[in-house]
Image (cartoon, helix red, strand yellow):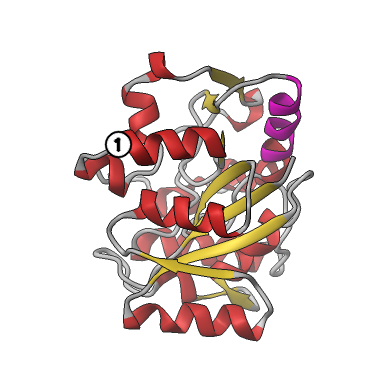
Amino acid sequence: MKLVTIIQARMGSTRLPGKVMLPLGDTIVLDYVVNRCHQIKGVNEVIVATSTERADDKIEQWCDEYHIPCSRGSQDDVLGRYHKCAREWDADYIFRVTSDCPFVDYEMASDIVNEMKRSSYDIIKVEGHLPRGLVAELFSFKTLEYMNKHGLEARHREHVTYYAYEYPEQFNMGYFRAREKLQHPELRITVDTPEDYKLCRLIAQHFKSNLLVSSSEVISYLLEHPEIAAINAHIEQKRVI
């Protein structure tokens, strides 16, 4: 079984342009994501999937400099971009991670891999009320091919797994219950707005740029410092089309 993690990344953002390349601790946001994805047990390859837009040349150049595999595809057809990348790397299973999640929970992702190995699920959905920015989605290449063939609406092309959640009866969907200590939906641990970025910079500073600090430690820090958690508490997550 070949398992790859595909990190979708682009420079364009309506609320925080260029967020993936912003400084964070001693490095940049994208480097946090890549390093944490490398800690997921069972993953054979970590790939950055960006678009063919000229603005995203900067992402490919960074990947080349640090010897990180990079695939380029459509800016708006993110599902097609994932399908292209997964075919290029001959993936059997794919983790989907977004590049604005510098504290993605690699320990939970490793547990999800173990769950997939014990089962024959097409896709595993994480259950629970978690902070925004921790979850990686795992699905089979067979599932990705099916979604790419049948998910023809704009919402399906922009949001990779939207089709599976809209038509769950067409898939053998597994459910993974996240640990109770992670159940804090009031927290945002992502980089989507200037306020989010300010909070994540404070987290990185507190943990002395430790790229592999556990997500549970990050949550504990925010719970112990409500004034920091409040920085982005008012931000509303963008609605899925």
Residue lying at the far top of the rendered structure? 169
Mark 1 nearby-residue class (10 Å; few <14, some 14–19, many ≥20): many
Name the residue: 73% across, 64% down: 210
Name the residue: 20% across, 39% down: 153
- The one nearer the camera, 28 or 166, is 166
Name the residue: 24% across, 40% down: 152
Amino acid at circle 1: Gly
- The one nearer the camera, 219 or 171, is 171
Whole-percent x, y for residue 172 in the image: 52, 17
Whole-percent x, y for residue 62 in the image: 56, 82
The quarter holding residue 15 reads: bottom left
Q: Is residue 183 visible?
A: yes
Whole-percent x, y for residue 179 in the image: 66, 26
The quarter holding residue 57 reads: bottom left
Residue lying at the far right of the rendered structure? 41
Q: Is residue 186 visible?
A: no
Name the residue: 27% across, 59% down: 76
Using residue 217 as the reference point, say whether residue 137 is left or right of it: left
Secondary structure beneath disc 1? loop
Q: In the picture, which quadrant includes the C terminus? A: top left
Number of labels in the image equals 1
Residue denoted by label 1: 151
The quarter holding residue 1 reads: top right
Magenta-tinted stretch: 109-118
Q: Main secondary structure of the magenta part?
A: helix
- The one nearer the camera, 7 or 202, is 7
